[in-house]
Amino acid sequence: MDARLRLNDGHKRSRRAMTSWVAIAFFLWMGSSLAWAGDNLKAFPAAQEGMVRHVIDLPPQANEADLKVELMIGKTVKVDPANRYFFGGRLETEIIPGWGFERHVLRELGPMAGTLMAVDPAAPKVYRFITLGGEAPLLRYNSRLPLVVYTPQDVEVRHRIWRVQAGDRFVQKLALPGAQALVVAEGDFEPRSIGSYSVRLYATEGVPVGDDAGFFTAGLVRARNGTLEKVLLETLKPGEAPSLIVTIRSVGSGAYLSVDAFTVTGNKVTLRTSIADIAADADPVAALKTALKRR
């Protein structure tokens, strides 16, 4: 059995509308299935019994190297509105012998799991599209070949198209007491979706206000899975100096948040603690305070 997916331009919207990012690197389109005409489909075997072959057509675009495809695989189910849910399962990528083309296979959609927030028993349930757990992979955009996914019959396949917006790198400077400044920046020539970022400490004594950063004294480079969203100075424990808080937003459908906290002592920058993949709407400062209390 085949399911064909067609891109729907009527669903086009920017990532800013979804998560209010400080700096936007991608725009997305959302779509569901299509008709793909081409001899290359012969390379992809028919679905086995109980499975469906989903075929996604990617229309030709300028600069396709700047595009990525996010697959969203799951089911629409009725759940409470407060908790976050996901399905178990593993999407595998295989190379078709003799052709060299990729196909993507989900052999089983595992049981549904989720967070355990208390919910009013009288609260009405809602229909939501629940996807595989973890961050959805971003696949290469190639309009010359169909994107083919095999799943069990009762599983839905949706997709988003992401476009890199050049020249939109996150860079921000923060003034510190004691004639110092911090500069936080994503790595040069890196995609916004993944890469690194730096935290650099400068001495600003004698440097005119609003001029250059000052004299470099120390710094760190950290890996990031997502885009830098916000930096701020916040006191995490009473009586101590403010810490530098860096929040990172993943680019997948979950838009999960990761948080790094740094301390500045004299001319030294130190990573204090880090939290990965918390809820998209979580308070990063509150999450850091809770993590430090537990330690």
Image (cartoon, rainbow, N blue to C red):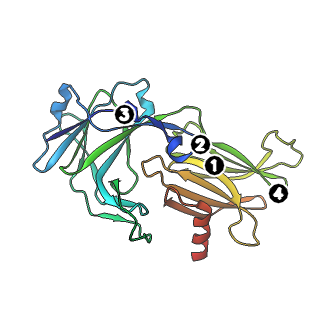
- Marks 3 and 4, how far apart in space? 47 Å
- Horizontal side of 109 relative to 66 (left or right) equals left
- Horizontal side of 62 relative to 78 (left or right) equals right
Which numbered disc covers residue 198? Answer: 1
Q: Which residue is mark 4?
A: 177
Mark 4 vs mark 2: in front: 4
Query: In this orientation, which residue lies closer to the viewer: 169 or 28?
Result: 28
Instruction: Tell me which residue sits at (41%, 67%) in the image.
Output: 115
Q: Secondary structure at mark 2?
A: loop
Which numbered disc covers residue 187? Answer: 2
- Marks 4 and 2, how far apart in space? 26 Å
* Image: 266 above or below 192: below
Inspect this view and state whether residue 203 appears: yes
The amino acid type, in three-letter code, at marker 3 is Tyr
- Circles 3 and 4, Cβ within 8 Å, touching? The answer is no
Q: Residues within 10 Å of mark 3 (few under 14, many from 20)?
A: many
- Marks 3 and 2, how far apart in space? 23 Å
Residue 14, horizontal then vertical, whole percent: 49, 37
Residue 210, horizontal then vertical, whole percent: 82, 40
- Horizontal side of 22 relative to 150 (left or right) equals right
Query: In this orientation, which residue lies closer to the viewer: 121 or 146?
Result: 121
The amino acid type, in three-letter code, at marker 4 is Pro
Q: Which residue is mark 3?
A: 141
Q: Quadrant of the C terminus?
A: bottom right
Q: Secondary structure at mark 1?
A: strand
- Marks 1 and 4, how far apart in space? 20 Å
Q: Say whether disc 3 or disc 2 marks the residue closer to the N-terminus.
A: 3
Q: Secondary structure at mark 4?
A: loop
Mark 3 vs mark 2: in front: 3
Mark 1 vs mark 3: in front: 3
- Circles 2 and 1, Cβ within 8 Å, touching? The answer is yes
